[in-house]
Amino acid sequence: MSNDTPRTSRTGRARRALAAVTSGGLRILVDLLAVSLWVLFLTLWFLENGWPRWAFYSLLLGGVGLYVALTAAWIDGERENRDEPK
């Protein structure tokens, strides 16, 4: 009977670790897809219109910065909800 508690505790930790790795991997894939689509959109748009390169890079960095600012707020909200006692 005394061996049941550590095994259950290890199983719970393993599940949480797997969930964290899966969540992190999924988040990286979504971020990669979003940034790749933004780069593709801007590249095609600027090639079609022949606008200057400095404007391309400004919009590229501004868009990625905005994306990071918005998604960082979502991630911080998830952490706060997870840390609250139930």
Image: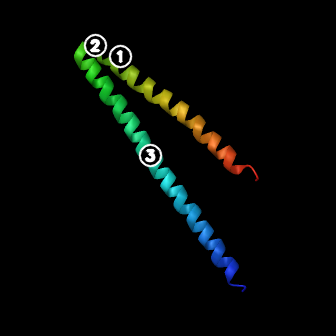
- Estimate the spatial distance between the alpha carbons at disc 3 and disc 2, rounded to whole Å: 31 Å
Q: Position of residue 71 (x, y in %)?
A: 53, 35
Say which amino acid is labelled 1.
Ala
Number of other residues with Cα within 10 Å of mark 1, as a class: few under 14, some 14 to 19, many 20 or more:
few
Which residue has dot 2 on it? 51
Mark 3: give few (<14), some (14-19) or many (20+) Cα within 10 Å. Answer: few
Considering the image in quadrants, where does the N terminus appear? bottom right
Residue lying at the far bottom of the rendered structure = 1
Give the secondary structure at mark 1: helix
Rendered location of residue 67, percent (x, y)? 48, 31
Q: What's the residue type where badge 3 is placed?
A: Ile
The residue to which callout 3 is attached is 28
| Number of numbered discs overlaid on the protein picture | 3
How far apart marks 3 and 1 lie (CA) works out to 27 Å
| Secondary structure beneath label 3 | helix
Q: Choose between 46 and 82: the one closer to the eye.
A: 82
Residue topped by disc 1: 55
Residue 27 lies, with reference to residue 38, above or below; the image says below
State the image quarter where residue 3 is shown. Answer: bottom right
- The answer to whether marks 1 and 2 mark residues whose Cβ atoms lie closer than 8 Å is yes
